[in-house]
Amino acid sequence: ANVEVAEMCCASCGITRDVNDDNIRLKKCTDFDLVRYCSDECQQEHLLQHEEACMERHDEILFTQPESTHEGDCPICCLPLPLEKSTLMACCSKKICKGCSFASAIREIEQNLERICPFCRHPAGVESDKIKMKRVKANDPIAICAFGMRRYNEGDFESAIDYWEKSAKLGDAEAHYLLSNMYWDGSVAA
């Protein structure tokens, strides 16, 4: 109800906009569209009052984490995975943020520990191809997409497309993107 009132009247003088009268036009607050004003004078009069509310709104927007990305959340720190800044763990097919990966690597170096997956604690490099194939056979869309990328890098475009199509059908957004690039550059006949 308050939002409707703010859209219908000037925040400074209180003059209301009549739906049938085009003479009164209320202009929006320039920063966060919280209130409306009938004139520049009213906006100047209300500036001190509005500035505080506007700054609160600015801080709220600035310091609020986004709900999530299409990548989902890091399974370790539970923050949204940033685009292009995540690591795919071959052993468990989990994408973790570079921050968690870096923190794990620092801990391993400082404590002279064996390199392991930060999520599942599986030793790095041990039978990774077998584990990847196991994840592919289990219909893990992320593992299937990664396998498609491997085939693409080897020059086997047909297999890459097959893997990406399967991954896309299982709901992987990255596979959809990679397929669209293949169609865009003409690597795939439509």
Image (cartoon, rainbow, N blue to C red):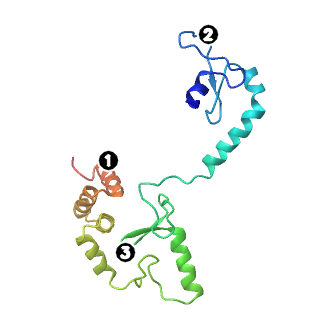
Give the labeled residue for mark 3. Answer: 90
**Which marked residue is nearer to the observer: mark 2 or mark 1?**
2
Going from N to C along the chain, the mark reached first, 3 or 2, is 2
Going from N to C along the chain, the mark reached first, 2 or 1, is 2
- Cα gap from disc 2 to disc 1, whole angstroms: 51 Å
Q: Nearer the viewer, residue 125 or 154?
A: 125
- Cα gap from disc 3 to disc 2, whole angstroms: 65 Å
Q: Residue at x 60, y 86 (%)?
A: 110
**Quarter of the image where one finds residue 155:** bottom left
Q: Is residue 124 left or right of residue 36?
A: left
**Which marked residue is nearer to the observer: mark 3 or mark 2?**
2
Q: Within 10 angstroms of label 2, few (less than 14), some, or many (20 or more) residues?
A: few
Q: Is residue 142 left or right of residue 111?
A: left
Q: Residue at x 44, y 75 (%)?
A: 119
**Which marked residue is nearer to the observer: mark 3 or mark 1?**
3
Give the labeled residue for mark 2. Answer: 23
Q: Amino acid at mark 2?
A: Asn
Q: Residue furthest front?
A: 1
Give the labeled residue for mark 1. Answer: 184
Q: Secondary structure at mark 3?
A: loop
Going from N to C along the chain, the mark reached first, 3 or 1, is 3
Q: Residue at x 30, y 63 (%)?
A: 141
Give the image location of residue 75, x and y in percent: 45, 68
Q: Is residue 190 left or right of residue 106?
A: left
Q: Contact, CB < 8 Å: mark 2 with mark 1? A: no
Q: Residue at x 65, y 44 (%)?
A: 58
Number of numbered callouts drawn? 3
Q: Secondary structure at mark 1?
A: helix
